[in-house]
Image (cartoon, helix red, strand yellow):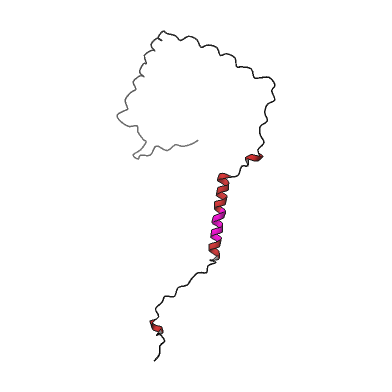
Amino acid sequence: MDQRPDPRLDQRPHVTQQTTAGGGATWGIAILLIVVIAAGAFFVFGGTNTAETPATPATESSTPAAPPADAPAPPPADTTTPPAADPVTPPPATDPAPAAPAPTGGATDTPPATTTP
């Protein structure tokens, strides 16, 4: 009797597996992503080195600064009430709009043609 399984009954799917090293495109994308993140961090947090910035020199004054002069006292407040302002005169009334519109020069809605000399 034959004990080998029938090859027609073997219904396992054929699965292709990736290697553990990954493809070249995967490594390229990963390196590019790291470079972009590093460049962004440099522009946000770096770029200026404050240790090399020269300190501003101190002034070499042996005499102390003179105190500021006293400001003049403000004039006393006026307790009288100001006179009332002139009443505002209303603007003159304008003529109402004409009842009929101005002629346009023809039956159409276009203005008359102009000629240049």
Q: How many marks?
A: 0
- Left or right of 64? Residue 18 is left
Residue 37 image point, x, y percent: 54, 52
**Rendering quarter of residue 47:** top right
Residue at the left extreme?
Answer: 99
Residue found at x 63% / y 42%: 49
In-image side of 40 versus 14 (left or right): right
Seen at 53% across and 63% down, the residue is 26
Q: Give residue 80's quadrant in the image.
A: top left
Q: Is residue 107 above or below residue 93?
A: below
Q: Nearer the viewer, residue 8 or 4?
A: 4
Q: Is residue 61 above or below residue 4?
A: above
Q: Is residue 59 left or right of residue 95?
A: right
Q: Nearer the viewer, residue 33 or 101?
A: 33
- Residue at 41%, 84% (x, y): give it: 7
Tell me the quarter of the image containing the N terminus.
Answer: bottom left
Residue 84 lies in the magenta-colored region: no
Residue at the top extreme? 80
Q: Residue at x 57, y 50 (%)?
A: 39
Front residue of 3/96: it is 3
Main SS of the magenta part reads: helix
Does the magenta run of residues contain 33?
yes
Magenta highlight range: 28-35
Q: Residue furthest bottom?
A: 1
Residue 38: image location, x then y, percent = 57, 51
> Residue 64 location in percent, x, y?
66, 19
